[in-house]
Amino acid sequence: MEYYVIGDDDTVLGFSIVGVSGEAVHTAEEARLAWQNALENKERAIIIISEDTADMIRETVDHYLFSESFPLVVEIPSPGSPFKRDLKSLVNEAIGVSI
């Protein structure tokens, strides 16, 4: 079982520190391609996607959130969004690794 992260540069870099691979995206087209890439590997059981990136491909993300059982999609706040938790606690919750 693998994790995969799709998001901005900082999010992908942060998750790479704990060994999670992923793709940094800047446009909706890049987000669509990264999503397809994530689904190609059947070992990727959990896709972590930042909120801003998910908004770029909202229809696709919502389809997996609400009607598919595999892979599990975890949407996390994007950097700069009004959220009270720090990156360390988000990583701990999303992948179960204490850093």
Image (cartoon, rainbow, N blue to C red):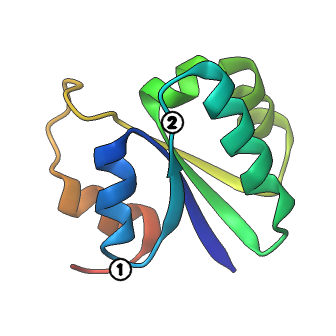
Classify residue 1 as left or right of residue 16.
right
In this orientation, which residue lies closer to the viewer: 97 or 36?
36
Q: Secondary structure at mark 2?
A: loop
Crowd tier of the residue under label 2, counting other residues whose Cα lies within 10 Å: few below 14, some 14–19, many 20 or above: some
Classify residue 92 as left or right of residue 3.
left
Residue 58 at x, y percent in the picture: 65, 20
Q: Look at the image and tell me in which quarter the C terminus lies.
A: bottom left
Classify residue 49 as left or right of residue 72.
left
The quadrant holding residue 87 is bottom left
Above or below, 23 against 96 in this view is above
Point 85% across, 45% down: residue: 68
Crowd tier of the residue under label 1, counting other residues whose Cα lies within 10 Å: few below 14, some 14–19, many 20 or above: few
Point 62% across, 20% down: residue: 28
Q: Tally the marks.
A: 2
Point 73% across, 38% down: residue: 33
Classify residue 92 as left or right of residue 29.
left
Of circles 1 and 2, the one toward us is 2
Residue flagged by tag 1: what amino acid is it?
Answer: Val
**Residue on which disc 1 sits:** 97
Point 55% across, 19% down: residue: 55
Q: Look at the image and tell me in which quarter the N terminus lies.
A: bottom right
Residue flagged by tag 2: what amino acid is it?
Answer: Val
Which label sits on residue 25?
2
Which label sits on residue 38?
none
